[in-house]
């Protein structure tokens, strides 16, 4: 089990100074950034693939990056919203609607597996923000995710921050929400903090006490053998560009990365 962090200049400076330990840098599918990060540590690719849109993917380029970085899995975000299914109410739990979305997801997983040369696909749980959000509830329904994994043989990329935000909108404990997940297919785990900003729950932030409680609860499931050991735990804090430049504070990295690294060490 490896410890990964989103690549950022701030993290690399801290690593060089000996303040954090990184097994791999997690990178978007940007060749120049991967080339830079790979000078310091091994990298792997987190692809921007979504079940909303696959037609624009340049498969030759993506496959080349996956090969060059020895990325073990190809991730796919399970997304479905009003743009794709305008006839389905966002909060619907109707079985007929679930079958529509499952068919959409299964078809996308199979497309990705075929176009990527048979690589093992892992599907990532996304965020549901209630009736006013951009995602259908059925896209994050544990029963739907379980069916997709059973029908395709793909793996699970578990994002516990996404689960925590979703659980808050559903009014349930994140631990209870996660107990419904097909965690026997766990292959990769993403961790970050989540809290309200301007009235909206946001992730990719410093871990709070509640975030640590959830993270340590999930780690205990792995430690006890209830969940399989993922190949990597990635801290999704820091990065490049407008989306992450305000979330790349060295003080946060020093606060969270060493503690998460110790957690990974205890699971190896």
Image (tube, rainbow, N blue to C red):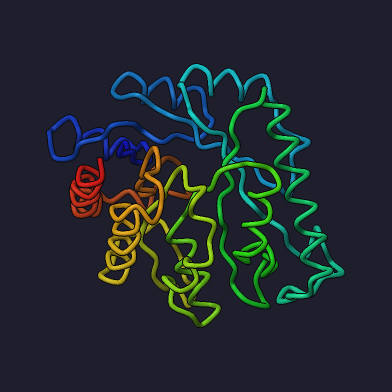
Q: Residue furthest toward the left?
A: 18
Q: Residue furthest toward the right?
A: 87
Give residue 243's position: percent from left, percent from top: 48, 50
Q: Nearer the viewer, residue 61 or 141?
A: 141
Q: Quadrant of the N terminus?
A: top left
* Residue depicted at 74% across the width and 44% down the height: 53
Give residue 51's position: percent from left, percent from top: 71, 47
**Going by the image, does 47 lie left or right of 160?**
right
* Residue depicted at 20% across the width and 42% down the height: 265
**Going by the image, does 261 lie left or right of 240?**
left
**Going by the image, does 224 lie left or right of 28?**
left
Give residue 261's position: percent from left, percent from top: 22, 44
**28 relative to 176, above or below:** above
* Residue depicted at 61% across the width and 48% down the height: 77
Give residue 80's position: percent from left, percent from top: 72, 58
Q: Quadrant of the C terminus?
A: top left
Q: Residue furthest toward the bottom?
A: 171
**21 relative to 144, above or below:** above
**150 relative to 82, above or below:** above
């Amino acid at each position: 089990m490896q410890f990964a962090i989103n690549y950022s200049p701030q993290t690399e400076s801290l690593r060089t100074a000996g303040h954090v330990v990184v097994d791999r840098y997690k990178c978007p599918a940007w060749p120049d950034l991967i080339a830079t990060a790979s000078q310091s540590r091994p990298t792997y690719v987190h692809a921007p693939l979504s079940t909303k849109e696959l037609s624009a993917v340049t498969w030759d380029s993506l496959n080349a990056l996956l090969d060059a970085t020895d990325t073990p899995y190809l991730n796919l975000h399970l997304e479905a919203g009003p743009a794709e299914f305008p006839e389905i109410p966002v909060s619907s739990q109707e079985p007929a609607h679930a079958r529509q979305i499952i068919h959409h997801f299964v078809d996308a997983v199979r497309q990705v597996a075929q176009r990527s040369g048979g690589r093992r696909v892992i599907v990532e749980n996304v965020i549901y923000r209630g009736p006013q959000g951009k995602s259908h509830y059925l896209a994050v329904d544990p029963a739907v995710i379980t069916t997709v994994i059973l029908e395709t043989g793909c793996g699970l990329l578990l994002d516990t921050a996404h689960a925590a935000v979703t659980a808050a909108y559903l009014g349930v404990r994140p631990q209870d929400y996660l107990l419904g997940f097909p965690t026997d297919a766990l292959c990769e785990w993403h961790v970050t903090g989540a809290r309200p900003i301007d009235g909206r729950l946001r992730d990719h932030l410093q871990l709070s006490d509640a975030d640590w409680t959830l993270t340590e609860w999930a780690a205990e499931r792995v430690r006890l053998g209830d969940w399989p050991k993922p190949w990597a735990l990635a801290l999704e804090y820091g990065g490049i560009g407008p989306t992450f430049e305000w979330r790349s504070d060295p003080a946060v990295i020093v606060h969270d990365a060493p503690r998460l690294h110790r957690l990974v060490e205890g699971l190896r």
